Image: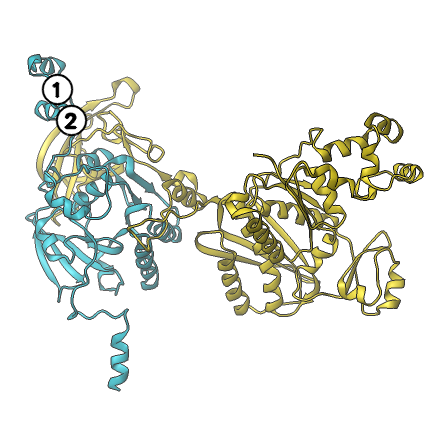
Amino acid sequence: MSLLWQALRFPELPLDVFRRGCDDEPLMAVVDAQRLLTVSRTAAADGVSPGMRPAQARSLSPDLQLVQRRPDLEQDSLRRLADGLLQFSGWVSRQPPFELVLEIGGSQRLFGGMAGLQQQLNRHLQQLGLHWQSAVAPTAAAACLFCRVGGDTLFTEREALAARLAALPIHAMELTPAQTRALSGLGLLTLGDCLRLPAAELGRRLGDTLSEQLQRALGERPDPRPNHRPRPVFHGELALPAAAHDSAAVLFALQRLLRDLQALLTGLQAGVQRVRLRLLHEDHAATPLLLGLQGLSRDGERLLVVARERLQRTPLKAPVTGLILEARHLLPLTASPTDLLRHGQTARMSWQQLTERLGARLGEAAISGLGTVADHRPERAWHMPAPASDRQQTASPHRPLWLLPEPQQLACRNGLPEHHGQLQLCQGPERIESGWWDGQDISRDYYQARAADGSRLWVFQDRRQPGRWFLHGYFG
Amino acid sequence: MTDALHELLREPRIWRATSAPVTTAATATGFAELDARLPGGGWPQAALTEVIHAQQGIGELQLLMPALARLSRASRWIALIAPPHIPYAPALAACGIDLSRILLVRPQRHVDTLWAVEQALRAGTCAAVICWPGQADASALRRLQLAAETGDCAGFLFRSETDAAQPSPATLRVRLRRDTEGVSQLDLIKCRGNVGPQSLQLKLDTPRVQALPVSWPPHGGRGRERMAETAPARPAIVRPLYPKPRSEQARVPQLQLPLDGERQLDRMH
């Protein structure tokens, strides 16, 4: 099986991080270092273009909204994007600032061939509200080069690589200004021009980086790509281009974030039961909302339903300028097995999942199993091991089902114990005398006793302190 | 007016005492006289059962032991949530319960108890969830009932006599009493398919576990209840605390080998 790489480039990511939170195209431009970096379609229609100064853009389009670039949000978005793409490939690599490559040769069959994979990938990216260019090629470096000149290239044959690359313009490569000047001075305009020259000579004149890039694109030099590892928590932040006054706009933005979450969960084969949503306001403290589900799920729609209920019940206290969605506990959730005979059965949680969930709220110490210990002393004949760990079981008949943690002293009359009236001793004594070796030795005579109200008790007389009776258990 | 009444009566949530008993999956209680009275012939599976008792130590746990012994030998778990005392492991083992299938949960707060019960019922991991919920209002119990249905789990709630008067959505409610003579009496307060309260006397102290087949063929699933009647009764193997001295074991004639190992074990004990 040969590797096949898909490169995805998000050239409008600086704008997309603001734009994807709202339904329609805003009149907006992103400013970086006093120049316009990316402009929206509607702004471009007014004549605004990247590279302009803000004042110039304002004069062309008076209503233009200018926002400062947020590189942190961009990188966060790229990371979440990579998380989500793990459902399409086990090998996703991020290339900041705007690129991702993923190996699809291994997974295309799962999606019904190349066409099916591309269709599902496109739908996924569309739902996230992003703009992208894509290219598929037998090497990662070549895929990136095709992507940079506009994308929409798809070929899988390694033999065609050299011919296809030769047609690319030289500016597709990452070049220093000095290299660009040198290349245009030499009259080398396409990659084909460079490839015709001997690699060693080219390297000496223009630096090794250029010939290395070419060799990687041709697959003649190893090109290791770091595999993206998702974080086991989800933190999604979305800035809204314009403050949202009603819950509908907030829900639209939330839907985008929930899609991110769902994509991560699908990639990790995990689920969440509870997510934390914070609505950011201009000059108020953030509104926290806790969205909970009955069971683990990775379905964003279910969380959206919960959020809709909550938002409709509690009105917004101020216009919303941004959203932060957090999920701390991503727990493993495998696809529910389908059974031929028992339809309509809910997926059963494993006992580990159940104890994890109970332990998460009650504390680990509150959950245990139950086991026996080979000891004659009743209070030491049992213990609480980890669940499912104890296979050794010693059964003792004539023992009560309830044991009191501490023997409880009983009142006495005429040398006989009392508990809600006189006790009647029915069976016994059973003498237990043990434990001299660890200083916790006991010497007791145990009896089964019946109380006036019909209950049966396990009582003992301490042989060290004659005449003193204790209650140690109930025959429940 | 009558139309409105008919409308109301058609509501699926309303159950009328005169209507035909609903056939429900059930687990045999291990007490023949009780099985005969209960619809489905046992403790309802995927539903809540309330056991109401005034005092402790009148055999309230013993009532469930045969059913729990059987359930613990199947593939699923048994959860004990917020027990009032220590469930004594050697005694449970003596009743035939596989302790490695027991999950003991001891929440600190009352709200956590109800939450844990709901989670355990809903998870589908447990065949039975036994809990001591303390105070619980009707809406909380309704949640538990739904959770039991979702998780296909038998929920047993132990409650005090004061809770008996309170209406409850549980499928089955029984009250256990014992008189001074030691005779246990079980009242069926609420039981679908049975008209009016009924009482029966049970001999709880007679260990019935011995006669029950507690070990199952590896394939479980449907028809398990039916198999309970047809499978040959094999006593639970209970290892004594004091094993017989080795000299006695050595006296088993060597020539009779090979014997079925299990049968040999039975004879020795």
Q: Residue at x 74, y 39 (%)?
A: A163
Q: Nearer the viewer, residue B201 or A252?
A: A252
Q: Residue at x 19, y 60 (%)?
A: B23
Any part of residue A294 in sight: yes
**Circles 2 and 1: CB distance less than 8 Å?**
yes
Instruction: Give the SS element for disc 1.
Output: loop
Q: Chain B hue? A: cyan
Residue lying farthest to the right in this orientation:
A185
The residues tagged by marks 2 and 1 sit, at their Cα atoms, a distance apart of 9 Å
Mark 1 residue type? Lys
Q: Quadrant of the N terminus of chain B?
A: bottom left
**Image check: A92 left or right of A97?**
left
Q: Residue beneath label 1, please? A: B244
Instruction: Give the SS element for disc 2.
Output: loop
Q: Position of residue A67 (x, y in %)?
A: 78, 59
Q: Residue at x 65, y 53 (%)?
A: A237
Among the 4 quarters of the image, the one containing residue A357: top left
Pointer 2 chain: B
Classify mark 1: residues with Cα within 10 Å, few (<14), some (14-19) or many (20+): few
Residue lying farthest to the bottom in this orientation:
B1
Q: Residue beneath label 2, please? A: B240
Q: Position of residue A126 (x, y in %)?
A: 62, 57
Colour pattern of the rendering: by chain
**Taking A302 as reference, is A405 above or below it?**
above
Mark 2 residue type? Pro
Q: Which chain is yellow?
A: A
**Taking A410 as reference, is B117 above or below it?**
below
Q: Nearer the viewer, residue A49 or A270?
A: A49
Q: Nearer the viewer, residue B33 or A300?
A: A300
Any part of residue A316 in sight: no
